[in-house]
Image (tube, rainbow, N blue to C red):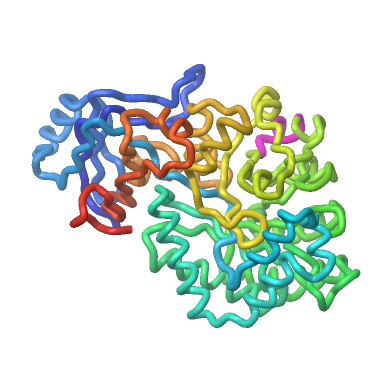
Amino acid sequence: MGADLIIENAAEIVTCAPRAGEARPGVLTGASLVIEQGRITHLGPAERVAAELAAKGRTPASFPRLDAAGKAVLPGFIDAHTHLVFAGDRVDEFSRRLAGEGYLEILRHGGGILSTVRATRRASREELLRLGRKRLDAMLAHGVTTVEAKSGYGLDRDTEIRQLEVACELGCLHPVEVVPTFLGAHAVPEEYRGRPSAYIDFLIAAVLPEVAARGLARFCDVFCETGVFSPAEARRLLRAAADLGLGLKIHADEMSPLGGAELAAELGAVSADHLLHVSPAGIAALARAGVVAVLLPMTAFSLREPYAPARAILEAGGTVALATDFNPGSCYSESIPLLSALGAVALGLSAEEIVAALTIHAAAALGIAGTVGSLEVGKQGDLVVLDAPSYRHLPYRLGVNLVETVVKRGEIVCDKRNPGGTAC
Ligand SMILES: [Zn+2]
């Protein structure tokens, strides 16, 4: 699986390869990058790459060529937190929130997540596939080559399983790679109103084992929040998931400092997400345990909540990834440009930190940093070409999509260079 490609003349190739003591994200100029059968096989000064190819009896001209003159080449973006598969929308709720109603208040009155649950339970598998494909197309056009996709709009056995099946199928049908996460504990369903602990019991007994046995999800996630699932309930579910071989994620400390970050550290979760109200002890625990902080500033923006303390997390030695949180309620957007802009302006991240947060650190938040997230020999040939000479334009061009070409496993899967290109 995968194609051959050579990329030449780039103004810069941003490798995002982790390098100790290096402030810049590994920027190469005058470099070529070769992909063979979907994997990066050569990367470095153009003359050296040509010599390496000659030693194998090949020439640069024998490869399909992408001329990146005047443009920056980056690893494909990884959106490490999305709720990709759902039906319906919540445009009315958005208006209600703008008029002053709170998110948890709307949820308490049967709105919020529960209205998406009703729409998703009613939707056929074909409808969910159709909607998912369209969303992946939009993500691809923003340079996303890998996306995490959570369930959590079924809150019953059949719909949760269907959402995960659809996520897996979308990953096979579409160039964007899909990493599925089981989020059955996204909210307490109407059938279990006031009995969150009994619902956790149900998930552990009746849904998790099938999810694990069929390999339908790589991670288990939980919405650990006041009025939703307590840290004790979250711990019980996540321990059961870990016993079945799933990796762990937590929606942590979003609305209140409930100790979700500390729990993520205690359980060795791969990431703790949101963290708007993370405590200083939680920040220290994340850094100590090497849990990636996945920050979702578009959600804070949309909910008019304070932003996560990104600088404090970095200063404590933590790792920060940025993700869209694409979902119909609190952030209906796949916009990497808006995410980058908020990363800079609202979270105070540098362009270097933003690029790393969208690539190598996002890969770490999905446990796949060994195969994607940076441009290095041996890794998958997933990359984006910006219609700009430097990665520094990414947050600078506020809200503007600079992605011109997207390559997945060596294949050009999105091309906006000319009207005859591969539309995406
Ligand atoms: Zn979420």
| One can see residue 268 in this view | no
Q: Position of residue 85 (x, y in %)?
A: 56, 67
Q: In this view, does 315 lie to the left or right of 139?
A: right
Judged left or right of residue 328, residue 391 is: left
Q: Quadrant of residue 84?
A: bottom right
- Farthest residue toward the right? 194
The image quadrant where one finds the N terminus is: bottom left
Residue at the image point whose x is 67% and y is 66% from the top: 92
Which residue is more in the foreground, 211 or 297? 297
In this view of the protein, which residue sits in the foreground, 205 or 102?
Answer: 102
Does the magenta run of residues contain 364?
A: no
- State whether residue 370 is above or below residue 101: above
The residue under the point 68% across, 62% down is: 183
Residue at far front of view: 99
- x, y percent for residue 388: 32, 33
Image-quadrant location for residue 329: bottom right
What secondary structure is the stretch in magenta mostly built from?
helix
The quarter of the image holding the C terminus is: bottom left
User: Which stretch appears magenta?
Assistant: 284-291
Above or below, 223 relative to 257: below
Q: Where is residue 289 in the image (x, y as percent from the top left)?
A: 70, 35
Q: Is residue 27 left or right of residue 186?
A: left
| Residue 59 drawn at (x, y percent) | 9, 38
**Ligand 1 is found in which quarter of the picture?**
bottom right
For this rendering, which residue is in front, 50 or 154? Answer: 154
Would you say residue 275 is visible in this rendering? Answer: yes
Looking at the rendered structure, the number of numbered marks drawn on it comes to 0
Q: Which residue is drawn at 50% across and 78% down?
A: 127
